[in-house]
Amino acid sequence: MNYFPDEVIEHVFHFVNSNKDRNSISLVCKLWYRIERFSRSRVLVGNCYAITPERVIARFPCLKSLFLKGKPHFADFNLVPQDWGGYVYPWIKCLEKNRTNLEELRLKRMIVTDDSLELVAKSFSNFKSLVLVSCEGFTTDGLAAIAANCRFLRELDLQENEIEDHRGQWLNCFSESCTSLVALNFACLKGDINLAALERLVARSPNLKSLRLNRSVPVETLHRILVQAPQLVDIGVGSFVCDPESETFLKLTALLQKRHSIRSLSGFFEMTLYCAPAIYPLFSNLISLNLSYAPAFPGKELIKILQLCGKLQKLWVLDCIGDKGLEIVAYSCKELQELRVFPSDPDGDGNATFVTEEGLVAISSGCPKLNSLLYFCAQMTNAALITVARNCPNFIRFRLCILDPTKPDAATLQPLDEGFGAIVQACKGLRRLSISGHLTDQVFQYIGMHAKNLEMLSVAFAGGSDKGMLHVLNGCEKLNKLEIRDCPYGDGALLNNVRKYETMRSLWMSSCNISMGGCRMLAKSMPRLNVEVINENGDLNRDGDDDQLVDKLFVYRTLAGPRTDAPDFVWTL
Amino acid sequence: MTPPLLGVGEECQSNVTLPSSSASLKASSKNLELHERNYMMGLFGCPTIKGPAAAGVFGDCKSNLNLKATELRLGLPGSQSPDRGVDLSSGEPDEKLLFPLHPSNNSHSGNKRGFADAMNTNGASEGKFMANSDVKAMLSPRSGTNIGQKSQPGLESAGPKAPRGVEGATLQVTQEQPSSGIKESRAAGTPAPKAQVVGWPPIRSYRKNSLAATSKNVEEVDGKAGAGAVFLKVSMDGAPYLRKVDLRNYSAYQELSSSLEKMFSCFIIGQYGTNGARGKEKQGDNMPKDAMDGTDYVLTYEDKDGDWMLVGDVPWEMFLDTCRKLRIMKGSDAIGLAPRATDKCKSKN
């Protein structure tokens, strides 16, 4: 390849898109490194504190698309204090200063302020796509700035963010000349929006393929939008509350009967059940269905609907579907690849429906293509997991969450080691695993032995000893992220294989048996790791004894040194 | 099979302290505001012990409020400490707690809350009584509280659910029992009616808040879009005439149940008039009364399909949609009604 002119090599690289491959290419030789870095336009920084924005831009001057991730995953579950960090502003400032031609910005679990959004909107004239997942810190004013200034905006995708809704007119801010929208998702907004502005926006966006509304958008508007936009492929219904006798409903029913192009459906934050039959005609064409925010669909209704979904590949649903419902899914949805079953009653306040191992076994035997699972269930058994492993050896992501986190095998009262062991043994391609239930060191031995492709492991309330963690650290060669909570691992486990942490993106340990001394030792022996002790309750004394127990520890490799924006309660040792 | 249920009503707030200090426990138990968790039981005589300010909806169990029964103890779920005898006739609340039942724990019938217990032939007042063990751990917001001595991760607790992060309490972790887990996560900082584990189950708070908001909205929406009142007939076995209720007046099962109880109390008194101080003791101290000592009533409904279902299984909004008629059945008749293994407090508020 070295006999080819650089342009040819560059052209070849153009076809290599995955970040991993690109990273590998750049390690081949200096020439390739140089060519690759000038041709890379899409950059993923998995931990925004692992490197400074300046260095990223210096290495990839032609970057057009940046994907940044901030807080550790457990921040989603309130385990990371509010002000821990993950601010995007410095990144945007740096991009702006270097006059990067930023077109796409994707952020996950970061703190985004209105100022940042405004800066994005005003600094990058070609800005096309903003995707925010699980972020917070901004309001609809920031969205207004984006809407007003990004004339070529194609995608505005807000997924599960906490956005302060000023009920302003941010939708109005889209200029009349903005006709380039392809995807608009504001389902997570809590407030009202200007419906007329929405309709006008849809009317002037002929390329709009994906539209996800929030709960304030009534069914009348939905109807008008559907009329205006026959090209829509992905719809997130806001509110589907209507009077079955009304004209809107009749017209909508007629319209939906003919919309065969809709492939993806979600939303239904509010629903009049009696009106559900209007949407039945959509289901046979659906590839993706997300009813996990639609508690108004009782199990029976879900069953009726799912029987129609012969082409479904991705299903997100609440556990009120029950095991029986999952059996129906297994029978009807042979193309299913991804299933997520969420608890409809996470706090156990009164809803008695749930799913168990039976539903999972049914799915595994009916849906051979299943490769991604997130399953919140009331109980599980080893036998079931073994069966699932046998039926579905193709799992890439397997996340099982038993609502009672230390519950053993419901039938035998044994730990669930054998079950998960079977999963890791059978699923050679497993990249992500979350385990729960009563577990001992044995399961980690299996994981260390068999899960050779595992990149991310989440463990909660497991039992056993330090050996468990060591099995994983020593055995899982591709381990990238390890997050542990409420397990009995101590300094021995933490310090046994410190070099491993430089090969990983991050390690999170909370409510384990780690001491200040252990953390200090780790920090001392591995200078290129940031060892952050999060002293949320103020119990710890920074200069105090080694044997103080550290409740929350976050360790990550970094080329940027200790971060400068850490709050008082986060100590980088 | 059920999400761990701490079996604590919304007002329960007790600081868990070690059982050894029983004196202080007794004191603290007085501060317990125990609230009827299972609306059904509350309606029909599940003895509950109330603290002074509680929203006393249900009648008092017995005039001899057995404080001992409210004492926090740690013991295997479903077991009674030796000195407590289960003296059912005296109406001592059965303290088999409402721990979520693991199928493995079947033998401890006391663990099963609800229906099956209602059928307890020894007339036990209903194992649903969770008074004592109501451990309402007030978790400090985002308290990354360490369980401290974790001999076993996970919160096995026998007896009172010893939630993690309980201030000052040491978790008694018993190894024998499979977890009678109590871990529910909760929005940080909210006083939890049950011991909550931060961040469990692991779902994004956005999703949790959204579901909560949605269920509230659904109620409102039903009100708005709806046809006004939803009047349903309510019959009670043995009563000479039926009543009608408007379901729209209530937003949760508990309200419905308390209202029904008031409505049908006259029939009950008639039967058990001599049974001690029945009737709502308006002593400012609304004690749920075990009106039907030894007889259980169960609230059921007929749904759209004509099936008779146990009230309380589905979310309130769903119930509004599907319920066509209500019937208060005698416990003995209700056996065939597919009991759920746990009945949890429908505290939707």
Image (tube, coloured by chain):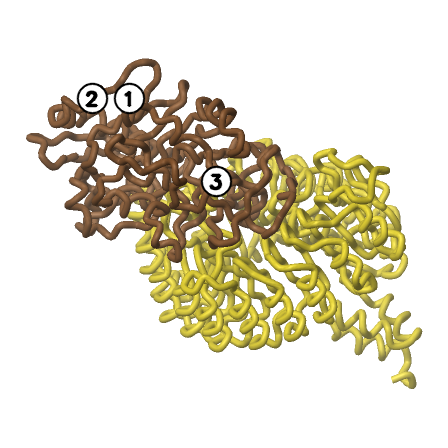
Between marks 2 and 1, how big is the CA–CA gap? 8 Å
Between marks 3 and 1, how big is the CA–CA gap? 26 Å
User: Residue B74 — which label?
Assistant: 3
Indicate the amino acid at tag 3. Leu
Which residue position holds label 2?
Answer: B276
Q: Earlier in the sequence, mark 2 or mark 1?
A: 1
Q: Position of residue B349 (x, y in %)?
A: 41, 32
Indicate the amino acid at tag 1. Ser
Is circle 2 on the same chain as circle 3? Answer: yes
Colour for chain A in the figure: yellow
Is circle 3 on the same chain as circle 1? Answer: yes
**Residue A262 shows up from this direction:** no
Q: Residue at x 53, y 35 (%)?
A: A191
Is circle 2 on the same chain as circle 1? Answer: yes
- Label 1 near label 2: C-beta < 8 Å? yes
Judged from the image, the secondary structure of the residue bearing numbered disc 1 is loop
> The chain shown in brown is which?
B
Task: Examine the rendered structure and indicate whether residue A350 appears above or below residue A472.
Answer: above
Compared across the picture, whether A160 is left or right of A239 comes to right
Task: Examine the rendered structure and indicate whether residue B113 appears above or below residue A493.
Answer: above
Q: Residues within 10 Å of mark 3 (few under 14, many from 20)?
A: many
Indicate the amino acid at tag 2. Gly
Which residue position holds label 1?
Answer: B63
Q: Position of residue A46 (x, y in %)?
A: 74, 57
Outermost residue toward the front in this view: B83
